[in-house]
Image (cartoon, helix red, strand yellow):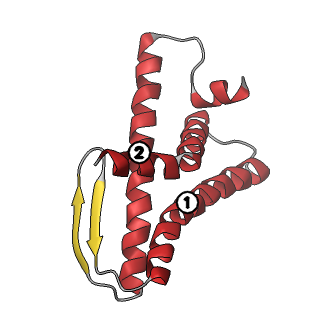
Amino acid sequence: MEIVSDLGFQKGSVFRWIGTALLAFIILWVRMFIHYLGQYVLLKIINCPVTSLSFTWYKMRLEYAFWNVYQEVLVVAIGVLANSLIFMFLVAINHIANKYIFCFPVKFCKVIAWYGLCMCLDFIFIVIVDMCN
């Protein structure tokens, strides 16, 4: 029940539910953006030619030159790793704020909780969108 409270699904008004649903949708999109941004940055670091990068509201399409299996493994792994690093950074900020200034805004805690849930399901969401396309 603690996760339900952290995500914002407690008893409340309709506007609070709409706000929570909107926050979840925005965090889903941010998770997807960071996933593909991490892949794009890796491809630029290893000097791989990126031929196109297109955005839509439910997917991003990243086309690049395929060189070898190691490159492909790195690209697949870095998307999930980029989200994990951002989540660890957010948790560290929360920890430092609670340790030294003894407070952290509840709304930001809700953002971190949603981001953590979306980060855990990142691979599944990417697979579902890729299989539908």
Q: Residues within 10 Å of mark 2 (few under 14, many from 20)?
A: few
Dot 1 alpha-carbon crowd within 10 angstroms: few under 14, some 14 to 19, many 20 or more: some
Residue kind at label 2, given as amino acid type: Ile
Is label 1 in contact with label 2 (beta carbons under 8 Å)? no
Task: Please provide percent x and percent y for residue 66.
Answer: 33, 80
Q: Which mark is residue 128?
A: 2
Q: Quadrant of residue 15?
A: top left
Residue 47 versus residue 74 in the image, above or below: below
CA separation in Å, label 1 and label 2: 22 Å
Callout 1, which amino acid? Ile
| Tag count | 2
Tell me the element at label 2. Answer: helix
- Residue 78 position, x and y percent, is 50, 69
* Residue visible at 54% across and 12% down in the picture: 12
- Is the residue 133 above or below the residue 25 in the image? below
Q: Which residue is mark 1?
A: 86
Identify the element where label 1 is drawn: helix
Give how far across and how far down residue 103 sits, in percent.
70, 42
The residue that appears at 50% across and 76% down in the rendered structure is 74
| Quarter of the N terminus within the rendering | top right
